[in-house]
Amino acid sequence: MAELLNTDNLSLFLYFVVPGFVAMKVYDLIVPSERRKFGESVIEVVSFSMLNLGLTFWIIAEINNPEFRFNNPVLYYFATFLVVSVVPAALAIATSKLLTSRFLRGIILHPTPTGWDYFFAKGQACWILFHLKSGTKLGGLYGENSFASSFPNEQEIYVQEIWRVDELGRFVEKVEGTAGTIIKREECKLIELFTKDE
């Protein structure tokens, strides 16, 4: 047990595993995806860690000098935190921004799995007209207090206000005392989205 906890082994784990794990977790929080199993993602974890190591090698080399560590303990721990947490998180954010940029559209596949996730990730307020399979039409306001699930969870949406609509689907009036409603995608044959004027 003592051999596993020696400084060299902890350093290997700290620089070759932790940054990749942090980067993947942050990336998965930004881009909806299947739940990862750590055992099946070892190569990705190490690859992200190696990229992080390449970017921060000069910092790692400097702070792991025994003299630096002894003379600057606070700076040592701060720099280590920066290398194993902050830089990998920033790398994940930059990667997600790059992969979803207009510059790469048409060159690589967009990482967002569904149109549902793409639209609701923007957090754009809008009016929603639900065409239920029962034949009923239901209006709703999707605003800052609303919520939509993301992949791989079942598609459902909470709208913060319910609105009555006429036969043509025009929004007539807000339902008095409404606290919103939750609609499952499978209950609808069509969902229409309309821009909301501020």
Image (tube, grey):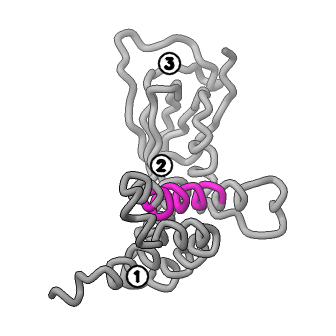
Which amino acid, by three-letter code, is at mark 1? Leu
Q: Residue at x 52, y 24 (%)?
A: 141
Disc 1 vs disc 2: Cβ atoms closer than 8 Å?
Answer: no
Q: Nearer the viewer, residue 168 or 6?
A: 6
Disc 2 vs disc 3: Cβ atoms closer than 8 Å?
Answer: no
The N terminus - image quarter: bottom left
Q: Residue at x 48, y 72 (%)?
A: 20
- Between label 2 and label 3, give the one nearer the viewer: 2
Q: Earlier in the sequence, mark 2 or mark 3?
A: 3
Q: Nearer the viewer, residue 35 or 75?
A: 75
Query: Residue 129 sits in which quadrant?
Result: top right
- Secondary structure at numbered mark 3: strand
**Would you say the magenta stretch is mainly helix, strand or loop?**
helix
- Secondary structure at numbered mark 2: helix
- Between label 1 and label 2, give the one nearer the viewer: 1
Residue 188 at x, y percent in the picture: 50, 46
Residue underneath mark 3: 164
Residue 97 at x, y percent in the picture: 68, 54
Q: Nearer the viewer, residue 155 or 198?
A: 198
Mark 2 crowdedness (10 Å alpha carbons): few <14, some 14-19, many ≥20: some
Residue 33 at x, y percent in the picture: 50, 64
Q: Earlier in the sequence, mark 1 or mark 2?
A: 1
| Relative vertical location of residue 64 with respect to residue 187 in this rendering, above or below | below
Residue underneath mark 1: 12
In screen coordinates, is 104 left or right of 177?
A: right
Q: CA distance from mark 1 to mark 2?
A: 46 Å
The residue segment tinted magenta is 80-94
Mark 3 crowdedness (10 Å alpha carbons): few <14, some 14-19, many ≥20: some
Q: Is residue 32 visible?
A: no
Q: Is residue 93 visible?
A: yes
